[in-house]
Image (spheres, rainbow, N blue to C red):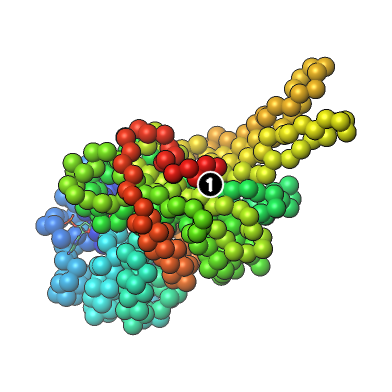
Amino acid sequence: MDDRGGLLCIFGATGDLAAKKIFPALRQWSDDALPMRRIWCLGRRSLDTAQYIDFIETRGNIRLGQSLRERIRYHQLEFGDAAAYQSLANRIHEQGFDQDARRLFFLAVKPEAFVPIALQLHGAKLLANGHPEHRLMLEKPFGGNLQSAVAIQQRLMDLVSEEQLYRIDHYLGKEMIRNVLTIRFGNRIFSESWHGGAIDRIEVTSIETTGVEERLDYYDQAGAINDMVQSHLLQMVALVAMAAPDDLGPDSIRQAKIDILNHLRPDPEAKQVIGQYAGYGDQMPGSATETAVEAWLRIDTPQWAGTRFIVRTGKKLAEKRTEIRLHYRPTQLCVSCSETIEARANQLVIEVFPHEGVQLQFNSKTPGYKYEIEQVMAEYCHSCRMIGNKPEAYVKLLQDAWEGDKTLFASFAELQAQWRIADAIRAAARQGDLVIYAPGAPAIISSGGQSC
Ligand SMILES: NC(=O)c1ccc[n+]([C@@H]2O[C@H](COP(=O)([O-])OP(=O)(O)OC[C@H]3O[C@@H](n4cnc5c(N)ncnc54)[C@H](OP(=O)(O)O)[C@@H]3O)[C@@H](O)[C@H]2O)c1
């Protein structure tokens, strides 16, 4: 099949995600020539294609190149309007698209719309059940809790097969997240000590300085647990804690993640803490939605006996930072048998954003005649080595979905396990108070004496 005969259909094409992530990614990709012949942009606003391009360029503050502009067509469509899907199908067929041509439907919409859209696509014969070239790319979140995720999945399974679903977690497309398995399994110095005997705790952090801003309605329903922990942070924990996969193929990696997620649960000896920044209530009076979380987790496998996993996220905190930080157990150094010197604990930091790289803190003798130990740092800057366009997660995800590579997309079994953990964190956290924190507070939310 000629790839250039394929089409990409974007639902929610007038939304924030389309303007800020999808079109910038397509623009970057078009430098290497986009493989799809047509990009259908679907929205309920009354616009023609030229007006739509103006709209997206203004909203996204970008300029689209000629090859991308030529592929775009706008089509007005309300999610539940069967006639609008039929007229879309007619327009697609008029342009000579083969039924077997690749069709990637990107649903940049809220999860409640997944089933209605899939139903209508099916009704208009745009989406055939089991057809490997007809794919649905679904934005996160997939549901709002375990129960709703299962309900969506069951209804989708009447219309498509699991192989046709590409569930996005765009953190999985980030350079340093894609580097985690290489760092872990490609280096004996790390792989040999990647267990509870050597590692005291692992912190997975993603915090930011901005507040909720224009996504208030969405955010107030979701909260930080659903927006960040359920998806991005638990996927990061899975990558950092999973056993070595049998191979680096998508099925083996996904299975290794499922296996470890099934052993992950809130630490019964720690508090799960949720917070809200002061001032959020002025935007959403009376809301108890959390804008920050600190969740303490345990993994009940022999490999991770004794290791605490701490996931943190929050808005309007002192800095913007995403990282995975391993705190090794301290060791003692015997210089002469009469004198024991405590060496400070090593730390390994995988920096995801804004800096991309690796830091290793280790002990060294101070320079000079005297014997003293100090902690020093070796740093690797990953982003410094990139020439030209910095790889963007959405470019990688769009390319992989187009090619049918599911390595970076979450399976339903992973999501089920993630929802089970997120729901358990939420239930435990709601037993405590909602901590009100000052905007710009230090990254770590006061956690009631759970000192590291
Ligand atoms: N924005 C982000 O950075 C981001 C990041 C990760 C995940 N997500 C997820 O991606 C999804 C979309 O996010 P977003 O920020 O782009 O949302 P948004 O700005 O609210 O956009 C929603 C889009 O859906 C359209 N829409 C809503 N109801 C419709 C209907 N009945 N018929 C036809 N079109 C309808 C909207 O059209 P109108 O323009 O006419 O309202 C708009 O194009 C959400 O699930 C969100 O959680 C977003």
- Considering depth in this image, is 153 or 70 the residue closer to the camera? 153
Q: Is residue 182 left or right of residue 278?
A: right
What kind of residue is marked 1? Glu
x and y, in percent, of residue 356 in the image: 52, 39
Observer able to see residue 365: yes
Question: Residue shown at 59%/64% (left/top)?
Answer: 300
Where ligand 1 lies, by quadrant? bottom left
Q: Which residue does the numbered mark 1 point to in the structure image?
A: 203
- How many discs mark residues in the rendered view? 1
Q: Would you say 142 lies left or right of 215 here?
A: right
- Classify mark 1: residues with Cα within 10 Å, few (<14), some (14-19) or many (20+): some
288 or 357: nearer the viewer = 288
**Considering depth in this image, is 98 or 357 the residue closer to the camera?**
357
Which residue: 28% across, 73% down?
115
Give the residue at the far left of this rendering.
Answer: 46
Residue at 35% across, 32% down: 440
Q: Could you say where residue 365 lies in the image, as x and y percent from the top left?
A: 76, 26
Helix, strand or loop for disc 1: strand
Cβ of mark 1 under 8 A from ligand 1:
no
Residue toward you, 11 or 74: 11
- In the orientation shown, which residue stands out farthest toward the right? 337
If the image is split into quadrants, where does the N terminus sit? bottom left
Asked which quadrant contains residue 139, the reply is bottom left
Q: Is residue 366 left or right of residue 17?
A: right
Task: For residue 10, say whether it is visible.
Answer: no
Q: Is residue 201 above or below residue 43?
A: above
Q: Is residue 228 above or below residue 388?
A: below
Where is residue 340 shown, x and y percent of the image?
A: 80, 33
Quadrant the C terminus occupies: top right
Residue 348 percent across, percent down from the top left = 62, 42
Up-down relation of residue 359 to residue 36 (above or below): above
Name the residue at 51% across, 55% down: 269
